[in-house]
Amino acid sequence: MLLRTRPAIRSSEITDKKLYLRRREFIQAAAVTAVGAAAGTLGVPQADAAPSWPRVKVPNFAKSPYGADEKPNAYQDATTYNNFYEFGVEKEDPSNNAGPLKTKPWTVKVDGLVDKPADYQLEDFIKPYALEERIYRMRCVERWSMVIPWIGFPLASLLKTVQPAPTAKFVEFTTLFNPQQMPGQRRDVLRWPYVEGLRLDEAMHPLAILAVGLYGEYLPNQNGAPIRLVVPWKYGFKGIKSIVRIRLTDRQPMNSWQLSAPSEYGFYSNVNPSVDHPRWSQARERRIGEFFMRPTLVFNGYGDQVASLYAGMDLKKNY
Ligand code: MTE
């Protein structure tokens, strides 16, 4: 997100040397992308590479009414074109490097302003909830998108179990910190561990899920095994992976991208085609696997369900 993006910069926007140097980086990155596109790959590895990770079916899950009427991307796209900086900053790094991440046993701590704080083993954590498939459009801040059939359960169900205190206003999520297993954490590309946050009413929205699987199978490590957040009306970076802690708080949490580039990333991060990223327009996106760009939809097309969460707010200021 900071390092490799397709350029959308007019020279009039370049004001100082730092930005100029960044621009050169982008042009080089674009040249690499252009070669990929010419080869017909659009940066996505070809489908003939056999997966090197275990593929385990989720035994029981229901279809839910929340499926988008869209064709999911190929499994290969979703599992080899990833952002997971704990395993490197290139799209193919997570699928190549995340194999050694040990996801059993896995503990999730729920604490902060809750009536029932607990350290859960993952199995106990997910056991009370019925798993369902949700086919969601996902829009990355880097202007690519995919449609992914997730398997998970509403975050709201968990929150109802742990009972937020009346003073709780926000939910903060934290990824595992383990530089031995996550080699990207040995470099300062982000402040580790990765953190994300939602307002409590956003977290309670039925579209926000904790996912444990995709395409009928448990999550491969590169997609955030064993449990990750999916919030389809927000940019993909809100979907924090490999969660070990969920903390209820009365203060708005900072998230990793805000901490690393406060002028570029805000707390809300709602998909909004009329709020440009400072370095590129967000009006259009490339669906991975398609050639032409398509218009980006406000709230990623989920406005009917979620716009009321933001009634009266200036979304240009609260980006
Ligand atoms: N979570 C952690 N812990 N580390 C990351 O680098 N990247 C985010 C998000 N969650 C990231 C993360 C970004 S930028 C995106 S676009 C999505 O994960 C990508 O999810 P996917 O690879 O499953 O498509």
Image: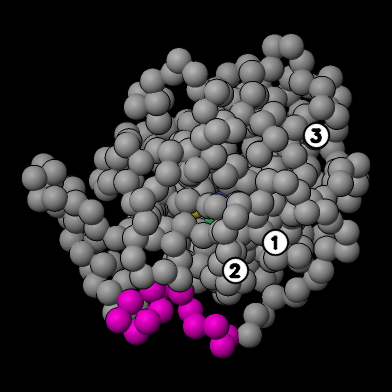
Image quadrant where residue 51 sits:
bottom right
Nearer the observer, 71 or 129: 71
Which residue in the protein does label 2 denote? 79
Q: Where is residue 16 in the image (x, y as percent from the top left)?
A: 12, 43
Q: Which of marks 2 and 3 is nearer the N terminus?
A: 2
Nearer the observer, 254 or 63: 63
Give the overall secondary structure of the magenta segment: loop
Viewed as shown, does residue 55 lie left or right of 294?
right
Within 8 Å: ligand 1 and the Cβ of disc 1?
A: yes
Q: Residue 214 carries which label?
A: 1
> Gap between marks 2 and 3, in whole Å?
27 Å
Q: Residue 39 carries which label?
A: none
Q: Where is residue 115 in the image (x, y as percent from the top left)?
A: 84, 19
Indicate whether 245 appears above or below 42.
above
Residue extent of the magenta highlight: 37-49
Nearer the camera: disc 2 or disc 1: 1
- Give the class, few, some or many, for how many residues have Cα within 10 Å of label 1's Cα (few <14, many ≥20): many
Q: Residue 157 carries which label?
A: 3
Q: Does the magenta stretch include residue 135?
A: no
* Residue at position x 61%, y 52% in the image: 68
Q: Is residue 216 visible?
A: yes
The amino acid pointed to by label 2 is Thr
Indicate whether 48 appears above or below 189.
below
Viewed as shown, does residue 77 lie left or right of 247?
left
